[in-house]
Image (cartoon, grey):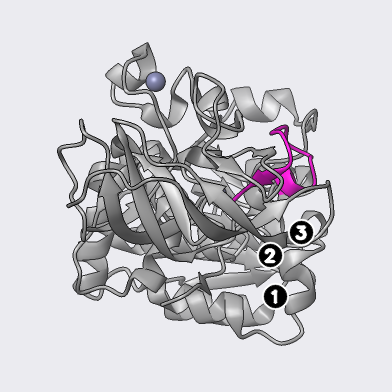
Amino acid sequence: MGSPASSRTIRAAIAREAGKPLAIEAVTLGAPRSNEVLVRVVASGICHTDIVVRDQHLTSPLPAVLGHEGAGVIEAIGENVTHVAPGDHVVMTYAACGLCNTCASGHPAHCENMGPLNFGGGRMDGSSATADSHGREIHDHFFGQSSFAEYAIASERNVVKVPKYVPLKLLGPLGCGIQTGAGAVLKELNVHAGSSFVAFGAGAVGLSAVMAAWVGGATTIIAVDVNQARLDLAMELGATDTVNSRARDAVAEIKRITGQGADFTLECIGRPDVLRQAIDSLGIFGVCGIVGATREGTEVAFNVNDMILPGRRIVGIVQGDFVAQTFIPTLIELYRQGRFPFDRLVPLRRDQPGDGRQRERRHDQTNSQDGPKVRESHE
Ligand SMILES: [Zn+2]
Ligand SMILES: [Zn+2]
């Protein structure tokens, strides 16, 4: 009971060619190895990073099973797995080695093995657990999970046990998009009581940041986007002001609202022009965090003296720089207390007519690319 099952035939969404739709195929998934777990996937978010990898703007080999915001139930465990058991509800998050200098110093999101573990297309030894109906290898272990499938193989290290009172279909995005926005605010930027914070982009990452800024006690919380419905939702989730940057100059508006510029800004979109605005909106000693990934090689110009004289800083942030094993349960407890209503983000992604065009296709030209959309699978 609970020992690794033998290989099984499952359905998975395969990314075979850059820019092409995923194809649902029957594939064979091998048994979990000694330190791995088999997860029956209940739902998976779709994150911007899935799309840029499918389109090969970020390098990771195809054909592959993508997906890295999966949540589900432990079905089987390898012989050396001790901290989860079959039947446990888990959120899968990014993979980190746990042993390198940055992992050992409490920063697994900056793991020295981040590339091969999350984008390498298989295990560290190069093997994959997935094969198509012709027996050809399909890359997997994307972000240590490859959750666009009925079952995923993760490691004991990158599954986070979660309480069973929260529906699993809501939880997958906690493993990437939501912890990214919330962690950036609460840990890396350390947005504190009485401060001012601006989220550039009111998708799931930006709105998670808005909610976290409210948790952190910021007294001026500004959301910037071009989508009025998202800005309206931001006001319900803790924003004190919004700026529709299609209609107004965001930097001028932020300076007007804050007086001399914001203490903290967060670029959640991955657009060079928006990053420049996030820098220019800072006040004295202001800090601009960057979580919006761009195409490889993207550069941004800024005024050097405008950085030096006010003592401004710019910082890159991965996954909020939190340890998911502690942070995801914290976010769920904040949710239970009514202080972090991330369930509000799910209808945002699913039910906005007129916005659907942006959600899956033109991700690199909109303000809507940074967040997850939960997709129910088979429960
Ligand atoms: Zn590491
Ligand atoms: Zn992601």
Q: Closer to us: mark 2 or mark 1?
A: 2
Q: Looking at the image, tell me whether mark 1 or mark 3 is earlier in sequence order.
A: 1
The disc label shown at residue 363, or none = 3
Q: Closer to us: mark 1 or mark 3?
A: 3
The disc label shown at residue 368, or none = 2
Q: Residues within 10 Å of mark 2 (few under 14, many from 20)?
A: many
Q: Looking at the image, tell me whether mark 2 or mark 1 is earlier in sequence order.
A: 1
* Residue beneath disc 1: 227
Q: Are the residues flagged by discs 2 and 3 in contact, CB closer than 8 Å?
A: yes
Q: Residues within 10 Å of mark 3 (few under 14, many from 20)?
A: some
Disc 1 marks a residue whose amino acid type is Asn
Q: What stretch is highlighted in magenta?
A: 52-66
Classify mark 3 as within 8 Å of ligand 2 or not, answering yes or no: no
Tell me: 221 left or right of 166. right
In the rendered image, which quarter is residue 369 located in? bottom right
In the rendered image, which quarter is residue 193 located in? bottom left
> Who is closer to the viewer here, 224 or 156?
156
Query: Whole-percent x and y of residue 154?
Result: 39, 42
Query: Whole-percent x and y of residue 183?
Result: 38, 47
Q: In which quarter of the image is the C terminus?
A: bottom left
Q: Are the residues flagged by discs 2 and 1 in contact, CB closer than 8 Å?
A: yes
Task: Tell me if residue 261 can be seen.
Answer: no
| Residue 56 is one of the magenta-drawn residues | yes
Classify mark 1 as within 8 Å of ligand 2 or not, answering yes or no: no
Query: Whole-percent x and y of residue 134?
Result: 71, 46
Number of dots carrying numbers: 3
Query: Is disc 3 placed on a helix, strand or loop?
Result: helix
The disc label shown at residue 94, or none = none
Q: Residues within 10 Å of mark 1 (few under 14, many from 20)?
A: some
Mark 1 to mark 3 CA distance (whole Å): 14 Å
